[in-house]
Amino acid sequence: MEFRSEKDLDGLIEIPKEALWGFHTQRYLDNFQIGNEHLPIEIIYAYALIKKTFAKANFEFKLLSKKKYQWIEEACDEVLRSHLDLQFPLKVWQAGNGAHTNMNINEVLAHYINTKHKCKKKDAIHPFDEINLNQSANDTFSTAMHVAAATKTIYELFPKLQMLQTAIKAKEEEFQGVVKIARTHLMDVQPITLGYEFESYRTQIEFGMQALEKALMHLYEIPLGGEFVGKPTHMPLEFSHRVCEILAENTNLPFFPALNKGSKISAHDAIVGMSAALRHLAISLHKMAKDLQLMASGPNSGFFEIHLPSNHEHSLNPQKSNPWQIEALLMVMAQIIGNDASICFAATQGQFELNAYKPLMIYNLLQSIQLLSDVAVNFSDKCLMGIKPNFERLEENLKHPLIVSYRLNEAVGHEKAARIFDLARKKDLSLKDAAIQSKLLTKQQSSWLFDTKQMIK
């Protein structure tokens, strides 16, 4: 690999010749060699939108020439087209306010412009004086968190959750007439339909999506233009409002200036709220998956009420169809819940005017959004749509005496019902036959009472 040399206050530093970043980014790379977790590319794209936004605002306020504004805008578009992804090598484990990433993108944009336009020193774009004009890492990184989370939720997560919802709804309708046993405390209670259980799952997902929509509203409130602590030191309030307007135009999303920008820099309640909504969905999906896992257990000694589709994968026993898709979903839900715990802790660590856990929080949040998006589609396609009832086992379970005990108690009273149960046990009869033999119910009454279809109306 060939290198070029750049000089800073600490002396010369070697940088890969093809790299567009400068000595600041190289110092960060050398000094923070921790882990393999790169900052998500969505943050870089959000930052490109923010730098593009400031370039326009600075031009409008006559702080930047038209030529340099256009150059910066062109360079930001190059980032947004994913042409410069490899120029952003920094990890999550960096400055807690995201300052390293802010400087990385400043240097890349400046170097790209100066190289492309063959700028002489007097015309060159400066990474700090012009790319970063009227900005701080505190307000820009905080805003990039909101932009990245909102866009990923709207354009990726919502459509995929809707696909999952549609798949559950299809199963709900398909299983509407499939009668099975309801259970509380894992004990048999009464007949319901498999469709009713799927209706419950769909309802939970709907509530979770409503929670996401509410959380999204808070992400639209941003501290952009607030510089270090939310109160700009030398720019008029109109500038702050204008950068928020331009960002809304650039993203086609309703971002607006926070009433108190400092609260969006020193704390991250909107990120906490979005993570909580994701946790809400994770808990609901975990519940559904555990139910399906139990329903599919067996084939001989478990519930075995449903058949799971084969993904053409084989365990050591070819007669089994292991619930691997369910297990994958459960692990994803555990990760989302764990990410939320980390975000919650990080959110408690704001000190005075700055929370310095920003990269960790957005890394976890974007990972949760990505995982939930992926698993919603994968689980729908590879498992949910292929689930079939095991009619033989379901019908066998419905013959169990406990299933209709509550109806028998209502029909003849507790003491007479106990006599029927006792007769059924002693003579090994069904409850229906025992009720008829005891002459406590007529044949017609028994037929109606023990009709499972009547029980689910």
Image (tube, helix red, strand yellow):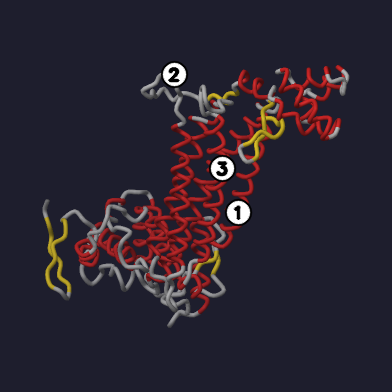
Relative to 313, 35 lies left or right: left
Q: How far apart are the two marked residues, 1 and 3, measured between alpha carbons? A: 17 Å
Q: Quick one: label 1 or label 3, which is nearer the N terminus?
A: 1
Label 3 sits on a secondary structure element that is helix
Q: Quick one: label 3 or label 2, which is nearer the N terminus?
A: 3
Residue at x 12%, y 69% (from the top left corner)? 12
Where 200 sits versus 319, above or below? Answer: below
Q: Which mark is residue 211?
A: 1
Label 1 sits on a secondary structure element that is helix
Where 70 sits versus 159, above or below? Answer: below
From the image, which quarter does the C terminus lie in?
top right
Q: Position of residue 276 (x, y in %)?
A: 53, 57
Label 2 sits on a secondary structure element that is loop
Where 21 sits versus 314, above or below? Answer: below
Of the two numbered discs 1 and 3 in the rendering, the one whose residue sits closer to the viewer: 3
Asked whether the viewer can see residue 37, the reply is yes
Where residue 29 sits, quadrant-wise, is bottom left
Query: How many numbered circles are shown?
Result: 3
Please tell me which residue lies in front, 49 or 149: 149
Residue at mark 2: 319
Residue at x 40%, y 74% (from the top left corner)? 134
Of the two numbered discs 1 and 2 in the rendering, the one whose residue sits closer to the viewer: 2
Q: How far apart are the two marked residues, 1 and 2, measured between alpha carbons? A: 42 Å
Q: Position of residue 210 (x, y in %)?
A: 62, 51
Please name the amino acid that badge 1 sits on: Ala
Please name the amino acid that badge 2 sits on: Gln
